[in-house]
Amino acid sequence: MTATNKNNKFTLYIIVAMAAGVAAGFFLNQGFQNKSITMTPDKLLEPFSLAADVFLRLIKMIVAPLVFTTLVVGVAKQGNINSVGRIGGKTMLWFVCGSLVSLILGMILVNFFKPGEGMNIPIPEAHGAVTQTGLNLRDFIYHIFPSSIFESMAKNEILQVVVFSIFFGVAAAGIGEKADIIIKTLDSAAHIILKMTGYIMNFAPVAVFGAMTNVIAKQGLGILGTFSRFIGEFYLGLFLLFGILMLAAYLFIRRRVLTMLRHIKEPALIAFSTSSSEAAFPKLMLELERFGCDEKIVSFVLPLGYSFNLDGSMMYMTFASLFIAQTYSIHLDFGTQISMLLVLMLTSKGVAGIPRASLVVIAGTLATFKIPEAGLALLLGIDPLLDMGRAAMNVVGNSVATVVVSKLENGLKHNVE
């Protein structure tokens, strides 16, 4: 079975599980309301919530080791930062700017639309008190640096793991061949954890069924209106982000932006239909070279972009994280939201390219800001629909980045079709 067929089948399973969960939840909700079900909701729904909770625990289990292994290997393979050179500097500057624009757009939209308000989901008792005050600059900077990497990993302090991983990766690159055995070992460990991620994601349909049944049974069908709002507002955000990217491309290549769109249309459709921007990578590389981008620049910028420049996913991370806070009626002031944006900016770089990576990153971010990770269960059912749009936008963002860097390096040829 091809990867495309597997992705399509998995999406179908998710949709079926979501529909079944809505139906089961509606049946139970009606039973609770007309008293035909005498068992208390909490006791009857415990197995359903347990399915979602176990899945979330499995996700949290792999976050820290996944960030550590993938980020160390990624940094070490880049070598000495000074040797990356002119193209690398321009590329990373574009990636940082693109990520910030995506994150800020997501933050603005979720604060404007407030899709989570009105759900009023109670904070799980096991979670304890939620810190609603923002982190000041001193606390934020102090919190970045770990006193013990083992403590940080044990507590899932992802930001501290990121900092340690960057130092470790740069140091490994600095000693050259002596570090090869460590980097190869961590690379193998990263692939093992990625395989684990695939196994864990196989449980997603069960978790979706449990989560949807639990939510609908307690809240009723009215909550679906919030989900439809969330999906519509997120795709509106993707449309706005697409416009910003096209404007940026136009500033550099003018009318050739339309030709670029014709070339990247098919890779974007592949990414959309498979919910995977990686599935479009070979075709995208070929089309960008046909458009006129220098082969050496494409082979450098595009793979790097798949690790550091996922614009659609970045926007979704702030949108979803703040949405979950809103559903629990947790007010996050502007300073806290900016802190969250910076955390997402860093943590997302360590796990890019992993299936459903956004869920992993969001889980770590929610834990950092003491927001119940159980809120992720609200997104499991609709995540495949959102993932399709994210994947397509990731392709568009990386295409624009490659074209712009090619133009800046005088490596964009004309009349190449």
Image: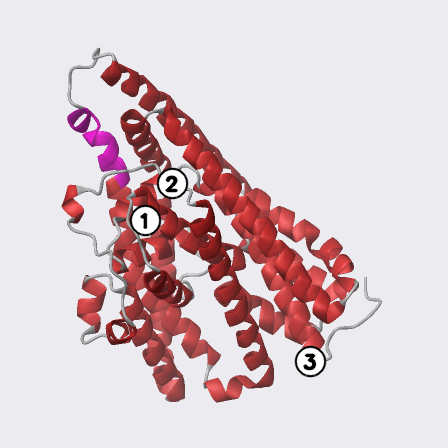
Inspect the magenta stretch and tell me whether residue 43 lies in it.
Answer: yes
Kindly identify the residue that appears in the image at 50 percent across and 65 percent down.
99
Q: What secondary structure is marked by label 3?
A: loop
- The image shows residue 40, relative to residue 107, as above or below, that is above
Kindly identify the amino acid type of the residue bearing the numbered disc 1. Answer: Ala
Kindly identify the residue that appears in the image at 54 percent across and 40 percent down.
5
Return the residue at label 1.
325
Number of marks in picture: 3
Q: What secondary structure is marked by label 2?
A: helix
Q: Which mark is residue 257?
A: none
Q: Position of residue 1 (x, y in %)?
A: 52, 41
Kindly identify the residue that appears in the image at 67 percent across and 71 percent down.
404
Q: Which mark is residue 380?
A: 2
Q: Quadrant of residue 13?
A: top left
- Label 3 – label 2 distance at C-alpha: 42 Å
Q: Position of residue 306 (x, y in %)?
A: 52, 63
- The image shows residue 173, relative to residue 26, as above or below, that is below
Q: Position of residue 397 (x, y in %)?
A: 59, 61
Q: Earlier in the sequence, mark 3 or mark 2?
A: 2
Q: Which mark is residue 409?
A: 3
Is residue 156 in view from this perspective?
A: yes
